[in-house]
Image (cartoon, helix red, strand yellow):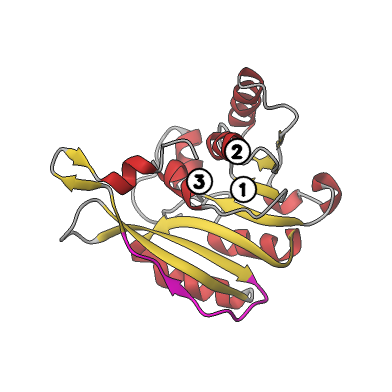
Amino acid sequence: MDPFILAAHIQPTGDEKIIDVGCGCAIMPLILAFRHPGLKIIGVEIQKELSGFANQNITANRMENKIRIIHKDIKSVKLSDISGQADIIVSNPPYKKKDSGRLNPDSQKAIARHEITLDIDLLLNCSTRLLKPKGRIYIIFPAERLSDLILTMERYKFSPDFIKFVYIQKNSAAKRVIICAVKNSSKPCIISPPLYIYASENQFSDEYVSLFMPV
């Protein structure tokens, strides 16, 4: 559910340009295009099969005039490919270190989960080039790797604007963290109220359900 949760927390202002790095089959671009019709959205996906699925989903939803998919490695994307720097980058990047855990034999799943073709260092490095001054990046990541994320952001001169922790339920450890960071900015960081997925054992919380409601 990570892309759904992240998409609900992205706050565009006006007709901005958004890049989804590692867009998969275009879940976030489609959600954003439906919720914010004025956006220009570009999805970047390194895997050929997934980029094909993304284009099929865009066509099926008649979003060809709002969303464009680039089948490339993010480090090969030029400013000319995206018609100049973007206002926002969003990403639900691979969250497992390359040398941690068992690598899935399915290469598509392995690339999606392990830092094989994309890690947070590469993501932030490319974001400095692809984002406008004061551009924002939104990321959802395992809460246990928050320190890795903050240190990498500092290395590339991104300052957290807000941080929100995601819990399965109360009295449990945080599972995910949502961060919005700003390029070359020193704004104070806001720690937002947490998101709880479940209010009780078998019932979703009202806030979680609200993420899927039309805006």
Mark 3 Cα shell of 10 Å, populated few (<14), some (14-19), many (≥20): many
Task: Say which residue appears at 43% left-offset and 53% top-offset.
Answer: 95
Q: Is residue 4 left or right of residue 33?
A: left
Q: Earlier in the sequence, mark 2 or mark 1?
A: 1
User: For mark 1, what is the residue?
Assistant: 21
Q: Which mark is residue 7?
A: 3
Segment tinted magenta in the rendering? 183-194
Kind of residue sitting beneath label 3: Ala
* Percent x, y of residue 31: 54, 36
Task: Say which residue appears at 18% left-offset and 59% top-offset.
Answer: 172
Q: Which quadrant holds the N terminus?
A: top left
Provide the secondary structure element on which disc 1 rests: strand
Q: Is residue 83 magenta?
A: no
Task: Say which residue appears at 62% left-offset and 41% top-offset.
Answer: 36
Kind of residue sitting beneath label 2: Pro
Kind of residue sitting beneath label 1: Val
Of residues 56 and 194, the one nearer the viewer is 194
Q: Which residue extends farthest front? A: 215
Q: Is residue 65 left or right of residue 90?
A: right
* Percent x, y of residue 63: 67, 27
> Label 2 to label 1, Cα distance in Å?
10 Å
Task: Say which residue appears at 48% left-offset and 63% top-offset.
Answer: 179
* Percent x, y of residue 41: 69, 42
* Percent x, y of residue 166: 33, 56
Above or below, 120 against 15 in this view is below
Of residues 123 and 212, the one nearer the viewer is 212
User: For mark 2, what is the residue?
Assistant: 29
Main SS of residues in magenta:
loop
> Label 3 to label 1, Cα distance in Å?
13 Å
Provide the secondary structure element on which disc 2 rests: helix
> Can residue 97 be seen in this snapshot?
no
Name the front one of labels 3 and 1.
Answer: 3
